[in-house]
Image: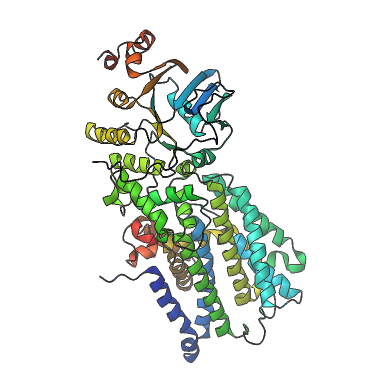
Amino acid sequence: MARVSPLQAALALFVVLALVPPIALALHQPYYLTFLSRVMVFGLAALSLNLILGFGGMTSLGHAAFLGVGAYTVGILIQNGISNGFVHFGAAIVFGAIAALVIGAVCLRTGGLSFIMLTLASAQLLYFITTGLKQYGGDDGFSFRGRSDFGAWLSLSDDATLYWFILTWLALATLIVHRTVHSRFGLALRGIRSNEARIASVGLHAYRYKLAAFVLSGTICAIAGALLANVAQFVSPSYMHWSRSAELLLMVLLGGMASVLGPLGGAAVFMILEEGLGHLTTHWPLLMGLILVLVVLYARNGIAELAGGLRGRAGIVR
Amino acid sequence: MIASSALPLPARMNEPGSGTSASSDATGADTAAVLSVRGLVKRYGGLVVTQGVDLDLRRGEVHALVGPNGAGKTTLLGQLTGDVRPDAGHIYFGNRDITALPVHRRARLGIGRSFQITSVFADLTVVENALLAVQAHAGQSFRFWQRALDDTRHLAEAQALLAHVGLAEQADRLAGSMSHGEHRQLEIAIALAGRPQVLLLDEPMAGMGIEDSAVLTRMLLAMKGTVSMLLVEHDMNAVFALADRISVLVYGQRIATGTPAEIRADPQVRFAYLGDAEFAS
């Protein structure tokens, strides 16, 4: 059987995704464009979470904090009349990295359950700070007009262009995560995940590697947040509520922690289920829970496993 | 069979501290010692687990550390690796005082180890296990772009290590799927990756059958002379087959050090091991 490498699979997926806008518009279904834009944004966030969760063994229940940092950065800048997209994304990357560095430096002093609780607490701290920003809508958040402005040659005000812009970031992040996971750094990171106690005795200081991965992950998630602000033209504290972090975790679990692309599929399935089940019944979280239980019981590596993309865990990183 | 000559191991047989010729230093350490312990004390509450232990691991020797259960062998070893912080005393690597160095720094200096309870990277393949150890010793691993497996120099070294311990055929298997004996072999490969000057072996034969135990003993014998080994082991056959010198630890104190013949004849040791038929043989 001919093997499709993950990069080839990713390339095929991104080509198909790139073809969506003209088709959706030709079918007069612009809704799908927006929906897929959101799927890609959350796929990007889940991809970033999986770098630390699936490959670094760090279960963060506060990853949505970085989504919020990116989104608020763009929202606040636009609200204050700064529309330059380079500034928006530059600032989102810088603030995302700083937030991840601070949160990671503290939380990674611990491990296991303490780490989960500390990441949760950090995100909730940011959540409550934003609810206190009265000039930016407090609890309710705020909507704004306009999107990141990259000059004449790239106008995000067009939904299709924004879609491709998101797709480009997603492809770039996928490539970066893929390369990182297979690099020397990635091998060290996977070694830490596999046996943290052993890593010191080969001469590596696990903390530094975990922190570097955490910062890279948080930064990518902040970019997802900046994109989310552009899609929604609305920012609110709910972006960084702990339940949002839990959703990101579920996307990763659904998609499969063992592969780079899995979380993207997980995000898609999660959001389609959310949409579909939401139409059927208001008690959709019940059905969602059931599905998650089934996935955990029967497909430990998520839909990536069901898709046949995995030949045991050895095949993950090939 | 173990191919001991297949690998230029270890390439670093020079002195640990620069310019430490055969001169004795201020600590009064054994002149030929690569690793020395002076007045080491470790207490857990009121229990003194290490009581003023002095110990010298000479360059190139296999030094066995034996003693009844609860003698404090593992705690002593833990202080050498850096996992356990001593309450008093000093540990020297060559001339350098490493008492305060953390685990990863000691590993970098050239102190390799194997664990009592097998500890490999179960989720990685066998060759990735070796490669990780090789690259860790080659410098930091903050390289984010180039594929680790594309580093031909490191990969060749990792494969040589695997060949050295007889696991060349298993390179692409998941480490977690291997047998207990193979795990031990892989552990030795990981421990050797840094071309250590010192190997600390914590009961390498534990849980092994006679067959596997003999394979490992032959492997360690083949390495003898190229690396100094401190061996904590209950298997007396292995100890007498391997050790140049033996130190006996009882209730946290070193009661004797000597050649296997001297130790066999030592009345104190016989007393401590009273009833242990293996010493009488």
Task: Give percent across and percent down for residue A60.
Answer: 54, 54
**Relative to B73, is A180 above or below?**
below
From the viewer's perspective, tell me whether residue A237 is left or right of residue A3: right
The answer to whether residue A237 is visible is no
The front one of B235 and A42 is: B235
At horizontal 52% and vertical 31% (from top left) the residue drawn is B94
From the viewer's perspective, tell me whether residue A74 is left or right of residue B45: right
- Asked which quadrant contains residue B251, the reply is top left
**Relative to B252, is A122 above or below?**
below
Task: Give percent across and percent down for residue A258.
Answer: 41, 59
| Quarter of the image with the N terminus of chain B in it | top left
At horizontal 33% and vertical 39% (from top left) the residue drawn is B184
The front one of B171 and B152 is: B152
Q: How many marks?
A: 0
Q: How is the image coloured?
A: rainbow
The answer to whether residue B11 is visible is yes
At horizontal 48% and vertical 50% (from top left) the residue drawn is B138
Task: Give percent across and percent down for residue A84.
Answer: 70, 78
The front one of A84 and A160 is: A84
The front one of A227 and A206 is: A206
**Relative to A113, is B31 above or below?**
above
| Quarter of the image with the C terminus of chain B in it | top left
Task: Give percent across and percent down for residue A255.
Answer: 42, 64
